Image (spheres, rainbow, N blue to C red):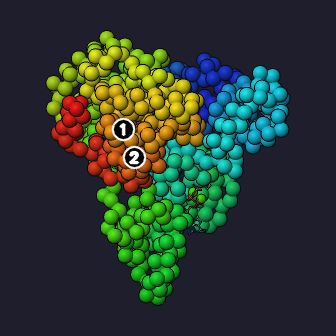
Amino acid sequence: MATNDEVADRLAELASLTELEEGDPNAFRVRAYLNAERAVRGLTRPAEESSATELAELRGIGAGIAERIREYVDTGRIAKLDELRERHPAAKRALLDVPGLGPKTVQQLDDELGVRDVDALAEALEDGRVAGLAGMGERSAAKLREAISELGLTSKQRRIPIAVALPLAERLVERLKAVPGVGEVAYAGSLRRFCEDVGDIDLLVATDDAGERVHEWLRASSEVQRVIGSGSTKTSVVTHDGVQVDLRAVPPARFGAALVYFTGSKAHNIRLRQRAQQRGWSLNEYGLASSDAPAVTTEEAVYAALDLPWIAPECREDTGEIEAAEAGRLGPLTRTEDLRGDLHDHTDLSGDGVDSLADLVDAAAARGLEYLAITDHAEGLRMNGVDRDAMLAQRDDLRRLQEERGDIALLHGAELNIGLDGSLDYDDGFLATFDWLVASVHSHLDRTVEEQTERVLAAIRHPSVTAIGHLSARLIGRRPPIRLDVERVLDAAADTGTAIEVNAALQRLDASVEVIREGERRGVEFVVSTDAHAVADLDRLRFGAAQVRRARLDPACIVNTRPWEGFRAWLDERRGG
Ligand code: DGT
Ligand code: CA
Ligand code: CA
Ligand code: ZN
C-alpha cells in the first residue's frame, strides 16, 4: 500500500535525520539516502512489487537501503527511522530549513545553547547568544535573522510549502478511498485553492456509517506522530514532518456543501453567504437552510442555487472572481489538457537528470503531448552541465528519433545558465543553432536588485533565448526569490517576445501568481513547463495548469496552449524577427 512517493519521502526523512546524526550533509550515508530517494521517485513501477534483491540492482539503491525499503513496504515502519526520530524531533529538524544552518551548527546550537527549534533560535539571535558562538559572529547571525523573517520560519508564521503538503494530501486521499464504507474523498482548504504554502491540510470524507472507522484509520496511520483531538465529526493529527491534518467526515448528501465551505477562502464563503441571504436562505457547511431552499448535494448545485457557474477552487479568494463569474467572464481557464507541449525537460545527459532521451520522448508522447523541448543544462553549470560535443551528439540522436516517429515534434534545446554579468553559455554562433533555449539563474542569488535585474535583462534581450526559466529562483519556504525589478523585466520580455516560464515544479511554482498577473497586464507571453528531471515529473503539468488558473491567466497568453503548427509559427516569427 506504500506508494513510491511515500517511500521516497521516508528516504528523504532518513537523509535529513542522518545529516543531523553525522553532522555532515556530505556524509556517505546521507548521499546514499538522497540517491535512493531520487531513484525511487523516478521508478515507473511500484517499489513494493520488487524484492530487496531486485531493488538493490537499481541504480542509486544499495543493499542496506533496499532492505529498509522492504521493511517499510512490509511493516509500515523502519526501525532505524523510529530511532532517529526519537533523537531528533521534527522541530529540531526544521532548523535545517533555515538557510545558512548546517547539521554541525544545529548540533552546536543544541549542545551549547539548548536551542532545539526555530523559536528558540530566534530568541537566541535577538539576545546575542548566537553571535557569541565559536565560528559564528555578528554577520552570520544577522543573515540568519534575515532568513528567518524573510521565509517566515517561526512557529507563529510557519506555513507548510505546497511541495510538502500536496503529495502527502493526495496520498492520504487515495488511502482513505480504500477504507470500506467511504464514498467521495477530497482535500479542501488553502491546499485545494493551490496556495503556495498552507497552514494545515483539510481532508473531507463522505460516508454514511463509516465515520468512526475513518477517524480511527487516521489516528493509526503510519504518517501520524500524534493526535491533537478526535471526536465524532473531526480528527486533528500531526504527521512526522510536523504537518497538521484536519479530517472531517460528512454524510454523502452534504459533501458538496461541506466541500464549498471547507475549501474557502473565508472571504469567498462570506460572499456566497451574502448571496444566499439575499435569496432568503442561509448557507453553512451543511448546505442551504430554510423551508424553500433547494437541496444541494454537489458543489455545482451550491453555485447554481446562487445563480453562479461553478468557480474553480484556485480562484476562490474574493479577488473579483464572483463578479467575473456572474458576468460570464471567469475563464476560460487553463486545463492540463490545454497544454499541448512541454518546453523544459532534462534527460540523463544532465548530471541531475534520470531518464534517457528515448524514454522521455516515449512518455511525453504517451501522455498526449504534441511537442517536447529537450533542454539539458549547458556547460556553464559546473556540476551538471554538458559540453558542445555532447550537445551535438544528443541533437543527432534527437533528429534520428524524430525521423522514426511522427507522433510528437521534438525540439533540441538547452537550459543556459545566466552568469552574474548576464553572460550565457557557449558562443552566439552555437546558440543560434538551437531550436529552443531556456535561460535561468542558478547561482549568485544574494545580490542587489540592480545586479539581478541587469543580468536577467541581458538574457531576455539575447536574440537566441526563447524563454526565461524559473524567473525568481525561489524554493518555496526554503529560499527567497532573487531581488528583481519585476516590472522592468516583464516589460522587456513583452518587448522582445521572450516568453516567461511558469515552472510547474511544486517547490518552485515560478513565476509566482503575482508576477504572472503583472505580466499579463504588460503583454507578456508565457510557457508552462515541467522542468522534468525524470519521466514521472512530466505529470507536473497539472500543477502548472493550476498555477495559471490561480493567476486567472488567459490561456491565449500561454504559448504552449497552441497546437504544434501554431506553436511552430509563433517560434518561426520570433526567431526570424
Ligand atoms: P490555512 O490552513 O491557514 O492555509 O487556510 P485555510 O483557508 O485552509 O483555513 P482553515 O484550515 O482554517 O479552514 C479551512 C476552510 O474552512 C477555510 O478556507 C474556510 C472555512 N472556514 C473555517 N473557519 C471559518 C469561519 O470562521 N468562517 C467561514 N466563513 N469559513 C470558515
Ligand atoms: Ca487549511
Ligand atoms: Ca484546518
Ligand atoms: Zn531545468
Q: Measured from the top left, where is residue 319 in percent x and y?
A: 47, 62
Residue 314: give its label: none
Amino acid identity at mark 2: Gly
Q: Which quadrant holds residue 362?
A: top left
Element type at mark 2: helix
Q: Is residue 183 visible?
A: no
Give the image quadrant in which the ligand numbered 2 is located: bottom right
Q: Is residue 187 left or right of residue 367?
A: right
Element type at mark 1: helix
Instruction: State the quadrant of the C terminus.
Output: top left
Q: How many marks?
A: 2
Amino acid identity at mark 1: Ala
Residue 493: give its label: 1
Q: Residue at x 29, y 16 (%)?
A: 430
Q: Residue at x 20, y 30 (%)?
A: 576
Q: Compared with residue 233, is residue 95 higher up or lower down, i.e. above or below?
A: above
Q: Is residue 507 left or right of residue 101?
A: left
Residue under label 2: 519
Asked if marks 1 and 2 touch (Cβ < 8 Å), the reply is yes
